Amino acid sequence: MITDAAPIVTARIGSPQSWTLRSYLEQGGYDGLRKALTMDPSEVSEEVLTANLLGRGGAGFEAGKKWGMLRKAEPVYLVINGDESEPCTFKDHMLMEEDPHQIIEGTLICAYAIGASQAFIYVRGEFALGLERMTAALNEAYAFGAVGRNILGSGFSIDVVVHPGAGAYICGEETALIESLEGKRGYPRDKPPWFPAAMGLYKAPTIVNNVETMSNLPWIVTNGGAAFAGLGVGRSAGTRLFSVAGHVKRPANYEVEMAKVTFRDLMYDPKLGGGIREDRQLKAFVPGGVSAPWFGPDHLDMGLDQDAVGKAGSMLGSGSVVAMDETTCMVRAAWRITRFFHRESCGQCTPCREGGGWLDKIMRRIELGQGRESDLDLLLDVCDNIAPGLGWPPQKTTICVLGPSIPSSIVSGIKMFRDEFLVHIKEGACPFGR
Amino acid sequence: MARLTAENLQRARQLIGLYPQSRSALIPMLHIAQEQDGWLTADGMAHVAELLDIDPAEVYGTASFYDMFFTHPVGRYLVSVCTNLACLINGADELLQHAEARLGVAPGGTTSDGEFTLEEVECIAFCGAAPCLAVNWRFFGNIGNDDFDRLVEDLVAGRLADDVPPHGTLNRVRRRVGLTAAGGPAPPAAHEDDATPEQARPS
């Protein structure tokens, strides 16, 4: 069921010129920062720990805990990850365009809590309007005195830089993002030793947090961490923004209370996804970005609970839910996802660089009617070489998790729709007429 | 085939000043070079290398990693059709086929008049309006074949000039406050007021 929890990060979206300082201030903007600046930085961190705020980028790590892992050294940098690129995720895109001041306020609260000397907001390069709105908002925030020297008369000073990316999925991975911010190719770094909190930007201790994570901070400081933790269930606290796409009638971003709201609600509730288009049957859905293994209709009543979804063999990941109805060719869907990973592999690690290419080619020939019966075993064998055991969470053979994400759609596809793969092979054509 | 103009040189130097280490300005500077020429010329990249005191090969090495940078000429309008999952299952392959037929070029190709380059891209995070595309990274959603044709006509006729600047122009809002890495923020410079951009999304 949809709960009556009021929206947190989307509260202002839809109001006239929601991206301007005037609109933001009219609706309580920068009050959270003002309050934070009267607190001790450690008290701010404590509130975020109490809130149980899980990172909203994809990995779902506790934000407050992450801050506590900073190596004690100066300077400390804060990097905000706005490089949203996980296919079918479009929530940060909206937040940057529609409520950039909320992100800036959250960034300043975080910077104050962790004692950062400078903050960088890395915006995906393709988001032209997002870059313009973030830059305009930053200009306004400086003029207002919320960024820069002696912020709001508190004595706290920090500079914020809006930094454009240039098109590379991998730069959403935090260490690749740091490389990119250093002006290099977006190659992920090995962890250890390159945990950003120990050794990040310019080898300094660095916190990398997602745009939506930051957007929650003004509310948490204003209302208290306990109020946030009171929403949702247990570790899956607060509300969360989900991108609902695919074959639903009303594809859009929806902010709902975690754990209490289910996948069925997201896709079928008349106020949310509104059901499957033309009232067709749901065949399967992606529960958390295309890196996540698929779920079938039997998982519809599962709550949007990070740990429960993890135990069921997938993840909430980036918060994107894609409905695929009965007309969907699952081979083509899995191939398209595989091709994506192959194209976006940075090329450092052999299992991902080569394995991804092999999988792309095998999936392609099956979809085009040139597959062989032995291809299903071959696919699984290659997948097993990238993520040994094919369990969840996947085992890594590579520097980052891009490689081990490649098997998700293929393994799901073969497990759930083996017959459909076989029909492609036996009939020498896609039964959906592609 | 150009080194940076005096104005862009100044913008580049301001960018360098924003970062604790100058090389961090590389990607933003390449966006300026691409804005100036529509693509990254060898001279433009060499000039960027000079300003950062690094080898031109380092600049090329970074530029070549990123999909948005072109080291060959592209059209005035870069039409990027998404064919990833949410768009795929809402007709993106058919849209791409139509785009190829309408423009007369395959993905990667540029029309003979140099106006349009067509490309197939991965998800551009506009899935609420699938199938979607971007023109010079301004987004257009729920695009059927007729919508595509109308969009091309509007672009050719210059009716979208305010919404869709020429390829390479990404962020039209300039940062008004500068240079802080070393000594804290400078006071805002006198500057004509940037209008906050309206959403560049014709319905």
Image: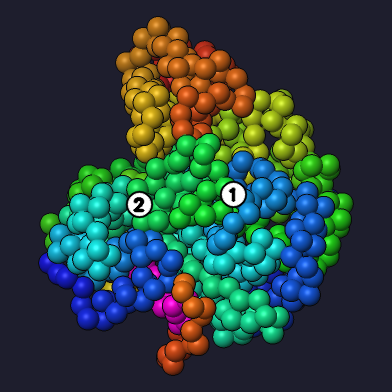
Residue type for callout 2: Lys
For the residues tagged 2 and 1, is the chain the same?
yes
For the N terminus of chain A, which image quadrant? top right
- Determine contact: label 2, label 1, CB under 8 Å: no
Which residue is labeled 1 in the image? A197
Q: Is residue A155 magenta?
A: no
Q: Which mark is residue A19?
A: none
Q: Position of residue B9 (x, y in %)?
A: 26, 76
Q: Secondary structure at mark 1?
A: loop
Q: Which tag is nearer the camera, tag 2 or tag 1?
A: 1
Q: Position of residue A429 (x, y in %)?
A: 36, 18
Dot 2: chain letter? A
Residue type for callout 1: Ala
The CA distance from mark 2 to mark 1 is 20 Å
Lower position in the chain sequence, tag 2 or tag 1: 2
The residue carrying pointer 2 sits among few (fewer than 14), some (14 to 19) or many (20 or more) residues within 10 Å by Cα, namely many
- Residue drawn at 21 percent across, 73 percent down: B4
Which residue is labeled 2 in the image? A184
The residue carrying pointer 1 sits among few (fewer than 14), some (14 to 19) or many (20 or more) residues within 10 Å by Cα, namely many
Residue A275 occupies which quadrant of the picture? top right
Q: Nearer the viewer, residue B165 or A332?
A: B165
Q: Is residue A244 above or below residue B70?
A: above
Residue A407 appears in the rendering: no
